[in-house]
Image: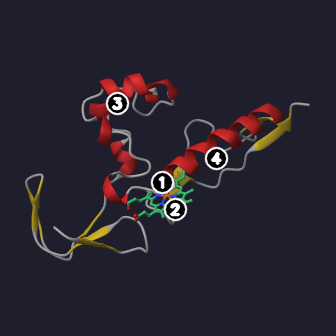
């Protein structure tokens, strides 16, 4: 099956010929995308606390024990068109977060719409992003 991308470099793709996928018939010219958010919040894969923020669930030993682990954690997609910037992005995030945590405490401002649960919206990218989220930084020293 050959598919083309609707965007310059990302999902979604358009099928160029008809195909059978997971018991469904998909005609040529159909826009298809992987719902990365739902995949990474799937209770069948991650358990009943799938919506909870539990960074330890991403430890390599835990991921390796999961069935289908290669396709369970997909923020950068997978396969031959997966994000080429993944290594750089992971290194940047670790570095920047460590620098910020050393110097600042950060919190949601009073009355934030995210106080009980992060409110999400669709960004330009197929991923969901937090909706309008001001953050209060307080210098540690
Ligand atoms: C947290 C940061 C990032 C996330 C979550 C992310 C996520 C993604 C996703 C989901 C795709 C789509 C793959 C597909 O269509 O199957 C993608 C593609 C891509 N990303 Fe990233 N990305 C990030 C950072 C970066 C950085 C820092 C760079 C470059 C320095 C980069 C360069 C690319 C490129 C060039 C593609 C297209 C790859 C291809 O089509 O062959 N990304 N990214």
Q: In the figure, residue 63 lies in which quadrant?
A: top left
Say whether disc 2 or disc 3 marks the residue closer to the N-terminus. 3
The CA distance from mark 2 to mark 3 is 24 Å
Q: Secondary structure at mark 3?
A: helix
Quadrant containing the C terminus in the rendered view: top right
Q: Are marks 2 and 3 in contact (CB under 8 Å)?
A: no
* Residue labelled 4 has its Cβ within 8 Å of some atom of ligand 1: yes
Report which residue position mark 4 lands on: 92
Q: Position of residue 65 (x, y in %)?
A: 31, 23
Direction from residue 110 to residue 125 in the image, left or right? left
Give the number of callouts: 4
Q: Residues within 10 Å of mark 2 (few under 14, many from 20)?
A: few
Report which residue position mark 3 lands on: 46
The CA distance from mark 4 to mark 1 is 20 Å
Q: Is residue 47 visible?
A: no
Residue at left offset 72%, top offset 50%: 134
Say whether disc 4 or disc 1 marks the residue closer to the N-terminus. 4
The CA distance from mark 2 to mark 1 is 6 Å
Q: Is residue 35 above or below residue 69?
A: below
In front: mark 3 or mark 4?
4
Q: Are marks 3 and 1 in contact (CB under 8 Å)?
A: no
Residue projecting furthest to the right? 141
Q: Secondary structure at mark 2?
A: loop
Q: Is residue 106 above or below residue 13?
A: above
In this view, the residue in front, 95 or 111, is 95
Report which residue position mark 1 lands on: 128
Q: Secondary structure at mark 4?
A: helix
The CA distance from mark 4 to mark 2 is 21 Å
Report which residue position mark 2 lands on: 123
The CA distance from mark 3 to mark 4 is 26 Å
């Amino acid at each position: 099956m050959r598919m083309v991308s609707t965007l310059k470099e990302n999902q979604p793709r358009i099928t160029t010929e008809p195909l059978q996928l997971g018991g469904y018939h998909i005609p040529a010219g159909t826009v298809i995308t992987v719902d990365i958010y739902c995949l990474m919040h799937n209770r069948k894969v991650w358990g009943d606390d799938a919506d909870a923020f539990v960074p330890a669930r991403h430890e390599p030993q835990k991921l390796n024990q999961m069935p289908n682990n290669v396709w369970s954690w997909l923020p950068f997609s997978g396969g031959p068109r997966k994000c080429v910037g993944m290594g750089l992005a992971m290194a940047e995030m670790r570095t920047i977060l460590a620098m910020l945590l050393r110097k600042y405490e950060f919190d949601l401002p009073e009355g934030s719409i995210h106080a009980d649960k992060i409110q999400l919206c669709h960004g330009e990218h197929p991923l969901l992003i937090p909706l309008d989220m001001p953050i209060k930084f307080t210098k540690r020293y």
